[in-house]
Structure formats: C-alpha cells, structure tokens
Amino acid sequence: MLVHAHPDDESLTTGGTIARYAAEGADVRVVTCTLGEEGEVIGERWAQLAVDHADQLGGYRIAELSTALRHLGVNEPTFLGGTGHWRDSGMADTGPLHPRAFAGADMGEAVAALTALIEEHRPQVIVTYDPFGGYGHPDHIQAHLVTTAAVEKATWQVSKLYWTVIATSALDAGLAAMTQLPPGCEPAPVDLIPTYADEEISAAIDVSAHRGAKAAALRAHATQLTVSEDGTALALSNLIALPIADTEHFVLVRGVRGVDSGWESDLFAGVEL
C-alpha cells in the first residue's frame, strides 16, 4: 500500500515500484488523500479548470490518476475517506486553508479512515513520505503523520513502513544522464532538491524494466507534468527538469531489514509471504 497526497505523486517517485510489484502479482493499493484541486495547470487547453476559474481540476485529475494507475498495473484509485472527502491544501503560506483542506483535517478522522483501509487490505508493506513530506507540501506532511499513526493504531501488523526518498547519488547520476529535456525546461539545480545520503538509504528498487509504464503514467498527468520525448526527463509547471529514474529509493522506518548489509533490492525482503 502506498499513501500519496495528490494524483501524480504516485507516479513521480514510486511509479516504477508500483509497476514492478503489480507485474509480479502483488496486490498493490494506491491511496490518494486529495484530488489535487489546487494544482497549477500546464498549457492552455485545461487552464480554466483551475481553482481560480471553474474549480473543476480535481474531477479531471481523477481521470488522469485512473489512467496512470492502469499503465502501472493498478485497476483503480482509492481515495482516503472517499472520493473528494479532503481537498488539496495548496502550498504552504498561499492563503487560508479551505474548510475541507487535508492539512487541516481532524487527525482522528483521517487516521481512522486509513486504519480501516489497512485492516481491510492487510498490506505487508506501506510506503509514504518522510516527516518533511519530501519537499514541504502541507498535504505530504499530513500524509506522513496520518500514515505513521494509522500503522501504529491498526490491529493488522504491517511488516515494514518505508519513506519514499531521492538518493543524492541517484539524482546526480540521473541529471547527468538526461539526454533530452521537456520543451522550455532547464535541469534542476541540485541544491534545490531535498535528497538523502547513500548511507541513509535502506532500499534501492530496480525499476528499469518498467520505465515505459512509468513514463506512460507520468504522461497521463498532462495537466501537471511534461515528459521529454525520449522518456529520460520530466518537469512540473516550474519548468525545472528532473530525471525519470530507473531506480527508486526508500528509507525503512518500521520493521526489520531484509539484508545484513547494503541496500535492500526488494521491499518485501525478510517478509514472510
């Protein structure tokens, strides 16, 4: 089970992992906490769906997420609390929170909703964000808090809890390997991307065999992302290009490492299946 804040987050840092385990026959569940209503829209075609116009972006992004998940081998999305229950909070300091904003959700209610999903689906491994939410978005931070609390509260014992992270060495190598950028984009400045040192990493999952599925999933989120024609780079609305990684990295924060030394190559390493 992977717990993400908005549609597209699942594909950005864990798309290859989702595709790999779905292809291997695992029952992969992607729990999305909001519809991403506050996202910045790329291009003119769908621009008026945004919050300052028709405010219909969230509904459109359900379709984008559904398509992306199908590319990754997952039948349908699962929304925390039900579809549209909590709303995208927007970036920090962008204005007062909407009454339904996920960042302002009642913790008891949100934790209970995720706990119920854990009890229903009984995942052996759960993936979410680190305490900073990867890059500080309030919804990512809330997803971290809710997931951590739900894992502790559930009577079903999750074997492993991971944070999805970016390894410093992998970012450096990926930026160097980008052979084509999305139109109008520049490579990301390394010092602006939060990363983890290699010694902090617990698992490195090879997803190179699923690069095509990952790139297709990213392209499905067309209101939010652009992808280079050769599938080596992506960019958000800020026009900063990032590599599409062949390896996805994780930090184990609950459970027992499945290897004596070095990085795990399987999130299920050491788990009795």
Image (spheres, rainbow, N blue to C red):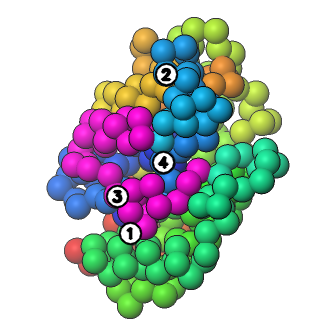
Q: Quadrant of the N terminus?
A: bottom left
Q: Mark 4 or 2 closer to N-term?
A: 4
Mark 1 — residue?
125
Query: Against 82, is 177 above or below?
Result: above
Amino acid marked by disc 1: Val
Q: Mark 3 or 4 closer to N-term?
A: 4
Q: Is residue 257 visible?
A: no
Left or right: 65 in relation to 96 = left
Q: How far, Cα to Cα, is label 4 from label 2?
A: 16 Å
Mark 3 — residue?
78
Mark 4 — residue?
35
**86 in magenta:** yes
Mark 1 or mark 4, which is nearer to you? 4
Q: Which residues are magenta?
A: 59-88
Residue found at x 43% / y 67%: 81
Mark 2 — residue?
46
Label 2, secondary structure: give it: loop
Label 1, secondary structure: give it: strand
Amino acid marked by disc 4: Leu
Q: Mark 3 or 2 closer to N-term?
A: 2
* Residue 164 lies in quadrant: bottom right
Nearer to the camera, 174 or 217: 217
Q: CB under 8 Å between callouts 4 and 2?
A: no
Residue 263, percent from left and from top: 50, 58
